[in-house]
Image (cartoon, rainbow, N blue to C red):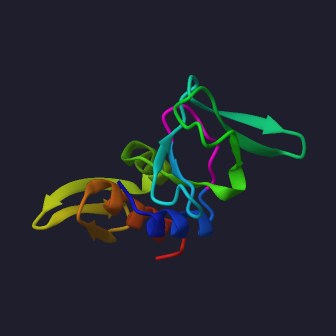
Amino acid sequence: MIDADLATRLRDAGLGWRPTSGDRFIIPSGDFAGEVFVVAEMTIEVQDVPGGNAVFKFNGTTEWALDSVDARRVLWLPREDQLRDELGDAFDTLAVVPGGFAVTLSGGSRHLDIDAERAYARALLHTLGAS
């Protein structure tokens, strides 16, 4: 799983997010810092509110201490498949290398990290011009 630093760098580089079921996110500050949440219609749903913003609503007893949180306070942790999809035609190969994985882009640049998700994230940062 990518960490908050990589996720923040992706967001700051312009990676957009339209929350859907199965997406992982964190609330970087406050009592729930470090906890990973997953959007799921039954327990955590996303509701659009007037003004074009969204809130994450926590239903039932799973997260009893939260009712809702403004989308601007959460940080998306994209999955491997989502990162690969974002790369689109720029993606060439994923290979196992000593110590981790390497993502090679169609232009020939290579991006290494300890797991595939993190390697995809680094490649996407490169394509967004934020490496």
Does residue 128 show up magenta in the picture?
no
The residue closer to the viewer here, 92 or 26, is 26
The residue closer to the viewer here, 75 or 93, is 75
Q: Residue at x 63, y 53 (%)?
A: 16
Most common secondary structure along the magenta stretch = loop
Q: Quadrant of the N terminus?
A: bottom left
Q: Judge from the rendering whether residue 17 lies leftward or rightward of residue 79; answer left or right.
A: right
Q: Residue furthest left?
A: 98
| Vertical position of residue 10 compared to residue 70: above or below | below
Does residue 21 show up magenta in the picture?
yes
Q: Judge from the rendering whether residue 114 lies leftward or rightward of residue 62; answer left or right.
A: left
Q: Residue furthest top?
A: 42
Q: Residue at x 26, y 67 (%)?
A: 113
Q: Where in the figure is residue 5, as x and y percent of width and height?
A: 46, 70
Q: Where in the figure is residue 11, as x and y percent of width and height?
A: 59, 63
Number of marks: 0
The residue closer to the viewer here, 46 or 125, is 46
| Vertical position of residue 43 compared to residue 104: above or below | above
Q: Residue at x 84, y 45 (%)?
A: 52
| Vertical position of residue 55 compared to residue 62: above or below | below
Q: Residue furthest right?
A: 51
Q: Which residues are magenta?
A: 16-23
Q: Where in the figure is residue 94, as x and y percent of width and height?
A: 25, 54
Which quarter of the figure has residue 67? top right
Which quarter of the figure has residue 29? bottom right
Which quarter of the figure has residue 100? bottom left
The residue closer to the viewer here, 5 or 128, is 5
| Res 123 visible | yes
Q: Residue at x 61, y 40 (%)?
A: 19
| Res 105 visible | no
Q: Where in the figure is residue 31, as x and y percent of width and height?
A: 56, 58
